Every structure is written in structure tokens, then in C-alpha cells.
Amino acid sequence: MSYIEVKRNTDSAEASLIAVSKTKPNSSIIELYEKGHRSFGENRVQELVQKQKELPKDIQWHLIGSLQSNKVKHIASFVHLIHSVDSLKLAHVIIKEAEKANRCIDILIQVKIALEVTKQGINAQNAEDFVNNLKDLNSPFIRIRGLMAMASFTSNMEIVRKEFETAKSLFDSIQSSFCENDTVFDTLSMGMSGDYLLALECGSNMVRIGSLIFGSR
Ligand SMILES: *Cc1c(COP(=O)(O)O)cnc(C)c1O
């Protein structure tokens, strides 16, 4: 029931819905798969690898949590989109492993918009330079598809809105510096169960929803 509702809301905002299935059993994933859903997100490499092995091969797997460089090799052959690139070192390893797997891996740059010290990501002020550095590598093995951001964990929706707006204007500014015929920088991944409607209002076009679809963890 809530899947249908969330799906309707994201569809009407022309956004993609990533069903975050971390800690949930394969049976829960299959239930959505049978409704036609194909995009799932996991935050731990080991769990992702296990599920990918066991579940239908046309599932598009998104790695949404922080990623250690030494684990990239486990997902390089199949991952659909890595949402959490936040260092040049990690980007270099993704390039190396993508080359070994003979494919191009799509990535998002995780930007830090929240006040909390615990949130991962590149500082907003450095994001544009970071993207330019990655572009300068000119690698055929990664495509920078956009940005991922997480808002502060707070019930104060005005704070959350400000943070989402910051991410959206950063996204627009970076997108405008890509050349016109280069349309790959097109994804702004923001919004979770508690704030996805606000994120969509603020211009998100990809939301990552776990508990609202699968129940609390
Ligand atoms: C767990 C997680 C989500 C989904 O969180 P919910 O509040 O359950 O919707 C989204 N993004 C990231 C990065 C996560 O780790």
C-alpha cells in the first residue's frame, strides 16, 4: 500500500524511486519486484553482493552508503549507480575497477549539506572544484551523473528545506557548466522516508525510500 502511494508521488514529480532494502530479506524485495519495481538501494557492500547473487539479474542495484575503496572491486561488475563518491581516491579506485570489469560506472558526488558532523560528503563549497577535477580525468570508465545529498536529521522542516535548496542550487550551477550536448549530469538524489515530499518540492529527481515502503528497521 505505501509502495503504491510513494510510487504515485514520485511518478507525478517525474522522479525515480529507489527502494532502500537494507536489512530486509529477499522476500520483501521480490514482493516489489513482482509489482514491476527494479531499482533497489543498499548501504553495505557485503549485503549488496549477497542479494545481487541471489535475486533476479535485471534488478538495478544502487550503492547508497559510504563506500571503502577496498570494497569497490566486489560491486564493480554490476552496480548501477554509486551515490556516495566523496573523495578523489575513491573515484580513482572506481575507475580502476570499472576498467577491469570492462564497463563504465555511473556515480553521484555526495555533498554535505547538513550541519551534523557525522554526515559524509564533499563540502558544498568544494563540490564544483571536485566535479571539475573528476571531469579533467576524462575517464571513459566513470560518468558523473549528478549529486546526492542528505538533510539534517531534524523535525525542523525549515532547516531541511534550506539544506535541500542549497543542494538544488549547487546542482543547477554545476549542471550549467557541463557542455550543452553533454546531458549526463542529470540526477539529484535527495529525499528519504521522512522528507521525500519536501525534497521533491525542492527539485529532487531521485528519492531513496526505505522504512516507508518496507516498514521500520
Ligand atoms: C537508509 C538510507 C535511506 C532510507 O532511509 P529511510 O528513512 O528508511 O527511508 C536513504 N539513504 C541512505 C543513504 C540510507 O542509508
Image (cartoon, rainbow, N blue to C red):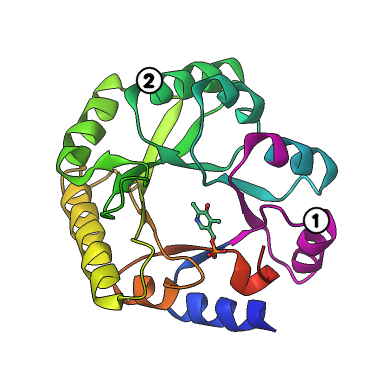
Chain-order first, disc 2 or disc 1: 1
| Residue drawn at (64%, 35%) of the image | 45
Q: Is residue 174 above or below residue 1?
A: above
Disc 1: which residue: 25
Q: Which mark is residue 79?
A: none
For label 1, the crowd category at 10 Å Cα-Cα, with few meaning under 14, some 14 to 19 and many 20 or more, is: few
Percent x, y of residue 115: 25, 54
Q: Seen in the image, is 133 located left or right of residue 70?
A: left
The residue closer to the viewer here, 34 or 111, is 111
Looking at the rendered image, the quarter that the N terminus falls into is bottom right
Query: Which amino acid, by three-letter code, is at mark 1?
Result: Pro
Specify the segment rendered in magenta: 19-47
Q: Is mark 1 within 8 Å of ligand 1?
A: no
Q: Is mark 2 within 8 Å of ligand 1?
A: no
Looking at the rendered image, the quarter that the C terminus falls into is bottom right
Q: Secondary structure at mark 1?
A: loop
Q: Seen in the image, is 32 located left or right of residue 138?
A: right
Q: Quadrant of residue 181?
A: top left
| Residue drawn at (24%, 23%) of the image | 136
The residue closer to the viewer here, 60 or 216, is 216
| Residue drawn at (71%, 53%) of the image | 23
Percent x, y of residue 97: 55, 19
Percent x, y of residue 22: 66, 52
Disc 2: which residue: 89
Magenta-colored stretch includes residue 188? no
Q: Secondary structure at mark 2?
A: helix
| Residue drawn at (17%, 37%) of the image | 126
Work out how far the residue at label 2 is from the one at label 1, CA to CA, in angstroms: 33 Å
Labels in figure, total: 2
The residue closer to the viewer here, 80 or 64, is 64
Residue contact at pointers 2 and 1, CB within 8 angstroms:
no
Percent x, y of residue 91: 40, 25
